[in-house]
Amino acid sequence: MRTIPKWVNKIHEADKIEFSSVHTICFSPDGTQLIVGAGEKVMVYDPRDGALVQLLQAHKGAVHAVAYCNDGKKFASGSADKNVIIWTSKMEGVLKYSHNEAIQCLAYNPVTYHLASCALSDFAFWSADVKAVQKYRVNGRITSCAWSPTGQHLAIGLANGGVSLRNKLGEEIQKIIRDAAVWAVTFLKQTLLVTDWNDTLSFYDIQGQQVLKERNIELSALSITTLGALVLVGGIGGWSVLTSEGVLIVSTPVEWVWSVAPSNSQNSMAVACQDGTLWCYQVAYSTVHGLYRERYAYRENMTDIIIQHLTSGNKVRIKCHDRVQKIAIYKHRLAVQLPERVVVYEQGDLEGMLYRVKEKLIQRNECSLLVATSEALLICQDTKLSMIGSKLPKSWTVPAPIRYVKVTTLQLEEVLLLGLFNGQIWQVEPASGVAKVILQSPGNVRCLDVNASRSRLAVVDEASVCRVYSLTNGELLYTEENVTAVSWNSWCDELLCLSGGGLLSIKAAHFAAATQPLTGSVVGFQGGRVFCLQANSMQTVNVPLSHAVHQYIQQKLFNDAYAVACLGVTALDWERLGTAALEELSFEVARKAFQRSENITYLTLIDQLQERIENGEKHAVIAGEVVAHLGRYTEAARIFHSAARDDRALALYLDLRMFNKAQEYVSEGDGLTNLARQRAEWARRVNEPRAAAEMYLAAGDVQKAAKLLAESGRRDMLIELARKMDKGSSESLRHIAEALVAVGEYGTAGDVYQRLGDFKKVAQLAVIAGEWSRAFNLAREHVDCKQDVYLPYAHRMAQEKKFVEAQKAYHMAGETATAMRVFNVLVGNAVTEERYSDAGYLHHLLASQCLDSAATAEGDRDELLHQYKQYDRLARIYHAYDAVHRCVHEPFSLSQPETLLNAARYVLALLDGDPPSGVSMFCLYLCLAKQAKVLNANTLARQMLDKILGLQVPPKFQEGVELLMLKSGGVTDTSGEEDVVPLCWRCRRHVPPLANQCPRCRHNLAYSLATHEVLPLVQFEPTEGITEVEAMDLIERMPIPEVEKNQTEGADILRINHDIDYSDPFLDKVEEEDEGIVECSRLALLQLNPACTVVVRRAPLPPLYYRNMLPELPVTTCPSCHNLFYMEDYEIQVVTKGHCPFCRQPSQEIRDFEDSREGSLTNDIESPTPRSPSNGDVTWQ
């Protein structure tokens, strides 16, 4: 580091010969203005040439202090006239305020831009946003002040040897005491620098603790400031430049220096003297550095060594605590020359960045070059090269000054290559002491370098000419002009990097160099990175090596090109290298190149081609394959043809869809047909389905044509093709039908399948299209279609939660197991959810299905009829139990007591053994007891209560049962007993309350399924020998009315069979041998009134005949389930509910109306039917 004077001025008083003492100076932040306080004047200079820009005369006393704000918009001046004036950067005064004493120093806060102004015994803070200036007293005379970089602390120097540390509110937080007057303080980062008149520089932290040892600076400081990491001090005796630790760098003796000011932006400084002299210096830094491969060592802050790994960017700092003069680095050794000694460091680990001190050598004379080898340390002084620190010192003297030293190895020996001022190149072997001239260059040597294999030497002279020599024979290989620095690539022998004239050149072997703009000098070249020294910093520049690769490729030097490419090129360069090598059938280089670019396609191709060569394939054919893959198809076809492989040329053009050229290599017959198919396939791929289909049809491939038309949605062409196709072409028609199905033309596809006689397919398409009416008709007409129709319908109903319809459909589809599983789930859910009416309805459906199956079955008919009876009994039990359960568990019931009593009695009469799931004997007995109590049938009530005592009573019914027992215990009224006891209409006697058959005449009681009361019906059967048809004919025939003898009115009457007994068999006395069923002869049948006769028909069961003994109460049957009802009750149920109370089938009138709206299994159902057992909340688990 050195200072170079830029200009000097001598400041005089106006119109006087006497000089004007310059007390204070400062630079603007951008370095464009130099503010000078001389005498009573404030002067503004241009730092570039020392020209006076403006003279400001506003003070009436000597100007003691000036300070520029960091925002660059204003500066301040303070004078002995006790005033502080604020000036703008345009040199206009904008504000003035005063103290009670002369102003001593000024300082702007670097963060808040507040101004601290100090008088002799007080100081104040001023800012533009605060009008009042608050002042603070200080014990002692103020001499100087300085803000910390954070703007949080203000240091004030005192003449009594103290330094007061204040916060930004003016409060004192620390105080430092020195032995002599303190006239200058400043901050370097967070360290406070204090100078006193004992010529001492001391260092403190914010807490007032000393952090570094004191330094004697050999002058009484009046001013101290910082320039980057340097410390500038001026005072009595001159001015000096110190390091951040106080080490002297430059010292200039002057009698009296009042102020020293730096300009960080312009890298310059100014010095103000007592004699009126104003100096301005340019600060110049010399680069002290060393480089070995990717390790770069350089000086920082004059006393520190930074070792930087140029590849990884890692850095390590070595503090020398003294001025660093020279640096040398080689392998694991680092040598540093200080003013009094040379320190040698060694690397702690080969891969790390840790260096330890190995030895210290006394060396007071500064040398021109410091050289380190793996074992020795050498210094150059003009023409002498000396080895220091060794037990046997050696030295060499050469005929001219040494300009450059390169440490390298030749023939496994470590040598020094010296470049001399006279152009000679010397080789020195430190180990043996041998020195000799190996080359003579025309000009004095500036720098030199050897390549990695030590076969070539590049020398640059002062004429900026680079000459490359062969080290083996000294032959000049080639030269390059306009070169100032040179470096060989440490990883590749043939690559040379040249710099000069603002350009960076990369030269490969004897090829032309590639250049790019670059300022600086190249000092190292490793792989694809160039280490370039720019100004005072080392930069790593990534350089492209593509041009060198291409130059080798042009000469078909693929191995050399690959070696250069490995240093770092783009993926495109690897592709070009691989392609060029592949074209020349250099498979190994091509494989490596494509592996770098990760081109799987070409790697696979290389493997295939190598395998074919190993199998005996001709090289010409392989070359044609390569050319074809590179896109030169005509050339590839020509190569194939010359190699007698027309089949490869044909395959090539077919793959390219170049059918016209393919015809040149195709034979007649099958070859043309295959070509036509290929053209059709190509038309399909280019989205020309119509043309492709026509080509397929022309080739006779109907299947592909139909499939293509379906994929492209050409319905019109498919329909037209289906109409034109002959019925005899069944296979083609089937392909067309499949294509029609694919495009959704189910109707047309169905017609095609119908032409083929495939009704199962027709049914399946009807199901897919949702045409259920057509599907059901097909199922009825063709038995083999049933499963294809009813099974999908069952799935659909199940998905729509219409489980009853689904169960029916499963049954009709023949899926008996599935139907039964659905039924069991539905019944289980109904019973669990206490929907006993639904459970009864479901059992009725299953019973009906068993009866229908029995009508068509042969082998297992008896079993089906037995199942029918079981399910029918359960249906009746659950149907009646629903009212009983609601009566017991619900607070209110709309049913009459007689109805509830009849329902409970009916269930008990039907029970055979254990009750079915969900049926509670307690509920039955309790309902019967409660309703008997209401109807004054107390005996029956007590009987039921006695039965309840044998059961476990639920807790919630306990109190009610006990109360009912208390009410029934002492009651003797039995007036209602006969009203609740059922009557047998066969023998006209009462039967037990819970009997289902008359114990005397064994007549089965007939019940109404609306009110569950005993109907006035007596079952009869025609006498043996009378058929059903004859019996119905006799019943429906009107009998001849009886005429009394005395009522003949004179008419002659012929009587035939007048002795025949006309006694009514229904009124005959019941004998013990009677079976309970009345047998009617023809005459008895003839005497029956058709209006009083009820016939129940359930195929395949035989009909049941009943006579109504109370004709005034007509009885009817449900047309669907054929159960018995009072006509009035049935009509009321149909009107209120819209259907039969048991089977839930509507009457014929309602059914006809609903069929027109909803339909059933024989038409398209889209909405739920009212005959479902419950709403959509039914779960199918």
Image: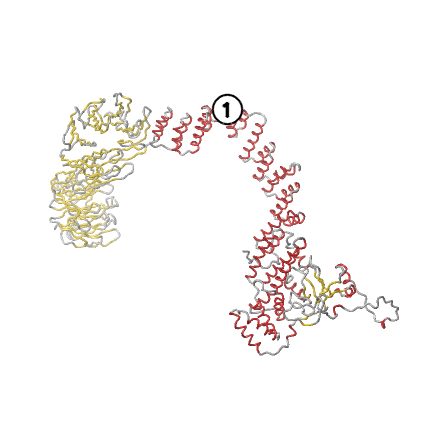
Which residue is pictured at 60% across the width and 72% down the height? 931
Residue 1172 can be seen, yes or no = yes
Q: Does residue 215 appear left or right of residue 907 in this picture?
A: left
Residue 2 can be seen, yes or no = no
Local secondary structure at mark 1: loop
Residue 1150 position in % (x across, y down): 66, 59
Residue 877 position in % (x across, y down): 61, 64
| Residue 1111 sits in quarter | bottom right
| Residue 249 sits in quarter | top left
Residue 653 position in % (x across, y down): 51, 28
Vertical placement of residue 655 versus 1000, above or below = above
Q: Does residue 1021 appear left or right of residue 833 in this picture?
A: right
Task: Spot the residue most to the front.
Answer: 1073
Q: Amino acid at mark 1?
A: Arg
Quarter of the image where the C terminus is located:
bottom right
| Residue 1130 sits in quarter | bottom right
Vertical placement of residue 328 versus 869, above or below = above
Which residue is pictured at 75% across the width and 63% down the height? 1022
Which residue is pictured at 70% across the width and 71% down the height? 988
Quarter of the image where the N terminus is located:
top left
Q: Does residue 518 appear left or right of residue 1071 in this picture?
A: left
Residue density around tag 1, few if under 14, some if 14–19, many if 20 or more, within 10 Å: some
Give the labeled residue for mark 1: 645
Residue 787 position in % (x across, y down): 62, 48
Vertical placement of residue 870 versus 616, above or below = below
